[in-house]
Image: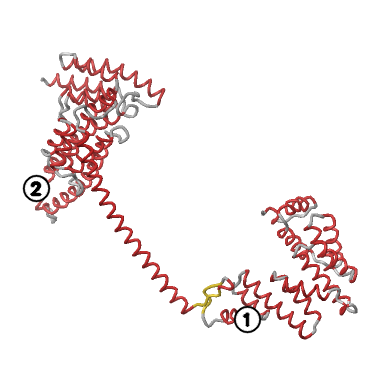
Amino acid sequence: MTHETSLIIAKKASQAQLLFPKSQYPTHRAYIELFTMMLSKQDICVIESDIEILSIALGNSSHQLFKTVSSKASLTEKLDSLIFDGLKLKIDARKRLAADQSELSKDSNSAVIDLIFEKYKVERAFIEAFNQQTINEQKIERIEEEKAKTKASPKRLLEKITNKNSYDNCLDATALIKKQTIKAKSLFPENLYPHYRRFIDFLIQQATNDSLRLSGAEMERLSSAFGSEELAAFVNLRSHNTIEDKLKHITFSGLQLKISAKKRLKDTGSELSTIANISVIREITKQYQGKLNAIEAKKNQEREAQRQAAQAKRLRDIKDAEIERLKKFSDFPQFDIKNIPKGSRGETILKKLLTKPISQDEKNWLDNEGISSERLESKYYLQLAHQHYQNWKQKKLPWELVNASAAYRKARELKKIKKALDETYPFKDAKKDKKLRSALLTTYGGVCRDLQEYGQGIKFGSEAHNVTPLNFRPCTLLGAIYLSTGEFTLGHEWYDKAKERGFSQAAYDNDIKSVYFRASDNIKSRLKQNLIATGHKYDWLSKP
């Protein structure tokens, strides 16, 4: 071939490739590049049968282009045909790109396309590596020439370059093996080709020397059960030395098997040929699955044993840690409080509270230290209530009954104080002391309110108001009861009277909040609307 002819061929090949810009038609551009390489016989030897398979995989238009180009006699005629008939292919691809945002037709086979591209991508990589090796050799020659001018040893420099390249090549090989494995398996979706998918898996295990692979004899027997093509695929696997070559062999052999299996599936509804020995296939597969199940069962036993051992160790560690913790800290489950330092003031006060009342100063200290809980609060007021009650009972101190009632209410222990109030009503001993009598009637009404005995609460609140008409406390009791029972107008009227008698705005706001959150769901919903309608603006009204 003359130099002039080579230039013409190169120009036509370039024109054919320019039909498909890489940015818009990457798949068709790669196809045309391989096509021109096959025609012009460049460094990479592209096999004509591969281009035919690739053309079929791309769809009818590409297959027709291949047949048209192949029918031409000379190389220039073939390239001219590739250019002009390639325009039809581009028109079809452009329409698909506009309509479906894809250059490929619906009948294209992406798996086959990727396989062919991958094959020649690897071969191109080998050529580029060879060219790079030549460049490296030239660099080494230059290094040798400059040896006298530099202190660095060219040999050591070359070793560094070589070691790095070896490491990079190792990483590339691992990635290539993984990619080839995925491609081989993707040929046979398990839901369509369960038998062939398992066969490919077995071949991959042979190629990668998997510890769970079938023996050579079992694999040969299984391959024979599938058919002659499958047996040839297994036997020829031995002729390849590296894992990469073996996986490539499996992939391309699998491609041929896929064509046959796909045709059988379409024609007969079965992936296997009529001469396949299904009983042998099932027998070996079942035996292998049994082996896997036994291995998995053993692994599960080992995992369970490890889990139990780890759990036992965790429990021991927790127990040991708890023993160490209790050497330094005390717990008070009666109050839902833990980790109080031993010997501390907090421990002393809490121990005291278990059996007797603590002072207000001691309670304030606990609060300031953040040592608190609902059960501690309840216990504090209960101990205080018992103390007041005993003072009233034993020392005949009438105001201690009022104090005991207030403390019992805060502790939410009402049975004992209700009985005492029932028995002492109508408080004859307090007839001469209006303030005491009013206080007893008011706290009695409060206990009834807490027990939801609202009628009795209103009765005692009204009596208390009659005894001390200028005291705001009976008014707040009646206001709270009426709001709690849905009689909002009366409730607000009694709270207004309480304000007129010295009840502060802050105390009023706290009272309204307490009534609201203690109310039933029905009353709470209505009270919320009423409060908003009457101009009450509280942030907590937005809370459930």
419 lies above or below 145: below
Residue closest to the far bottom: 395
Q: Could you say where residue 463 lies in the image, as x and y percent from the top left?
A: 88, 68
Element carrying mark 1: loop
Amino acid at the residue labelled 2: Glu
Q: Give the label on residue 145, or none.
A: 2
Which badge, 1 or 2, is on the more N-terminal residue? 2
Q: Residue at x 84, y 66 (%)?
A: 461
Q: Nearer the viewer, residue 85 or 525?
A: 525
| Distance between the alpha carbons at the discs numbered 1 and 2 | 99 Å
274 lies above or below 75: below
Q: Give the label on residue 355, or none.
A: 1
Residues tagged 1 and 2 counted as in contact (Cβ below 8 A): no
Amino acid at the residue labelled 1: Thr
93 lies above or below 187: above
Q: Is 330 displayed left or right of 170 in the figure? A: right
Q: Quadrant of the C terminus?
A: bottom right
Which image quadrant is residue 270 in? Answer: top left
